[in-house]
Amino acid sequence: MTTQPASRTSDALRATFGIVLFIAWAILTILWVYDAIYALVDGEPVPAIMAVVALLLMSLLAGMEGLEVAVIDRWSRLYPERSMSDLAAWLAARQLFVALIVTAATMLAERDSIAVPFMSTEITSPAGLKIFNLVWTGLTVLWFMQILPKHMAATNADRYLKMTRPLLFPVVELVRVIGISWPAEKTAKAIQNRIGWHPEAELEKAPSRGGASLTSGWAALTADRSSAAERSPEDPSRWSAGR
């Protein structure tokens, strides 16, 4: 078969690009941290304070992102008396933190200049600083505040909830109760009624591959795709091995 060499080549290219991207991110991180320390030693604490606040907000975002996956998977067990509409309202309230934290963290992470270690130069170009902030903040949020916590929550939702629920649930519940997401809910309802945006009629479902769900999908992020692809389609264990 020709698919195996092609798949291995694709995986190698993917890994190579990922490594290069990670190295680039690490260099940007070193510059970002060094600049804050450099300014602090020079008697200017504002960049260091803003950096700490940005990291704290990103950590909160990570907790919220994983919480979404865990709550969706365990909602009926956590609140057997509550409906799916209650879950939808909870998820809508949680989105506030995504919007506010990403915006705030991006603003706090931005610098007027970036000091370069062991050189008497600084990055001062407005375009260069914008690109620096976009790439560093974007990759940091994507890798460590989105993908990582969602995978962890999907792998062990109960443990994730045990760690984050006491701190984060009351905050989300407060946002839900005061109605910050209410305008979006009513706007969505009005638009859907206006354009006839309703669920489609149930069609015949495709054969199950082992019960795909949000948590099973995220939990399989680190699974060995190559070994699964190498199994023959006729092999019954292809879809049952992961159960």
Image: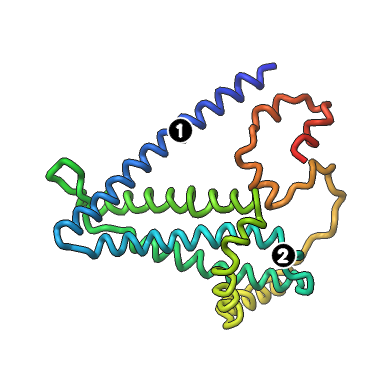
**Number of residues whose C-alpha sits closer than 10 Å to that of mark 2, classed few (under 14), some (14–19) or many (20 or more):** some
Q: Residue at x 77, y 63 (%)?
A: 199
Sequence-first disc among 2 and 1 = 1
**Closer to the eye: label 2 or 1:** 2
The quadrant holding residue 37 is bottom left
Q: Which residue is mark 2?
A: 75
SS at mark 1 in the image:
helix
Contact? badges 2 and 1 (CB < 8 Å): no
Residue sticking out furthest to the top:
1
- Place of residue 81 in the rendered image (x, y in percent of width and height, measured from the top left): 78, 74
Residue 33 spot, x, y in % from top left:
29, 51
Position above or below: 85 against 199: below
Q: Residue at x 20, y 59 (%)?
A: 40
The secondary element bearing badge 2 is classed as: helix
Residue labelled with disc 1: 17
Quadrant containing the C terminus is top right
Q: Nearer the viewer, residue 233 or 51?
A: 51
How many labels were placed on the picture? 2
Quarter occupied by the N terminus: top right
The answer to whether 8 is drawn above or below residue 141 in the figure is above
Q: Quadrant of residue 45?
A: bottom left
The disc labelled 1 sits on which kind of residue? Phe
- Tell me the CA gap for discs 2 and 1: 38 Å
Name the kind of residue labelled 2 in the image.
Answer: Trp
Q: Taking 183 as reference, is 57 above or below it?
A: above
113 shown above or below 199: above
The residue depicted at 43 percent of the width and 63 percent of the height is: 57
